[in-house]
Amino acid sequence: MDVMNVQRELRKQNITVPLIHARNGREALNLLRGENGETKISRPSLVMLDLNMPRLNGLEMLKILRADPEFKDLTVFIMTTSDLDTDRIGASDLGISGYIIKPLTFDSFGSEGGGTVDSFSLFLDLLKMKDSE
């Protein structure tokens, strides 16, 4: 996931929520659960996964989260370069809140089609709600 672009867009939108970045899917899971020497983080309001994360891809991690009673209802967005129907359907079947196809830059949002804009807008709206709590 292009973390710097997400951070830049959050700043542009004046959204100041804590953002925790994991280098790969295994590290993300360890942070959520407090396993393998990682300090457990507070339960996040939402999680953004990239389908192409190393060590544990986004769909694998999403399956694990949905099977875990602590995280089964967690709000999850997928942000990825994959426009494959199999990836979209697989993620949708696991109850994601949005599927965002990564543009080269966030300035190109709007040229990607309605679904991408709607999902990213929903993502920003949820973060704004969290920021105002």
Image (tube, helix red, strand yellow):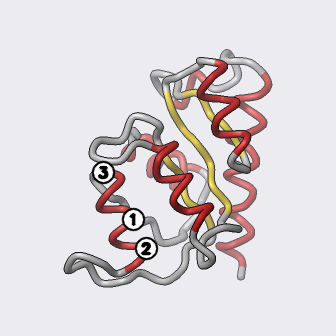
Give the percent coordinates (x, y) of residue 13: 62, 53
Query: Badge 3: few (under 14), some or many (20 or more) residues near its Cα, within 10 Å?
Result: some
Residue lying farthest front? Answer: 67
Which residue does the numbered mark 2 point to in the structure image? 32
Which residue does the numbered mark 3 point to in the structure image? 24
The residue drawn where x is 45% and y is 21% is 104
Query: Spatial distance from mark 2 to mark 1, Cα to Cα?
Result: 5 Å
Amino acid under disc 2: Leu
Check the image and report above or below for 3 versus 131. above
Residue lying farthest left? Answer: 37
Quarter of the figure with residue 116: top right
Q: Earlier in the sequence, mark 2 or mark 3?
A: 3
Query: Cβ–Cβ below 8 Å for labels 2 and 1?
Result: yes
The circle on residue 29 is 1
Give the percent coordinates (x, y) of residue 55: 27, 46
The residue drawn where x is 59% and y is 18% is 84
Q: Secondary structure at mark 1?
A: helix
Query: Spatial distance from mark 3 to mark 1, Cα to Cα?
Result: 9 Å
Query: Spatial distance from mark 2 to mark 3, Cα to Cα?
Result: 13 Å
The residue drawn where x is 47% and y is 44% is 58
Give the percent coordinates (x, y) of residue 17: 54, 70
**Relative to the observer, which residue lies in front, 27 or 113?**
27
Query: Cβ–Cβ below 8 Å for labels 3 and 1?
Result: no
Q: Secondary structure at mark 2?
A: helix
Q: Secondary structure at mark 3?
A: loop
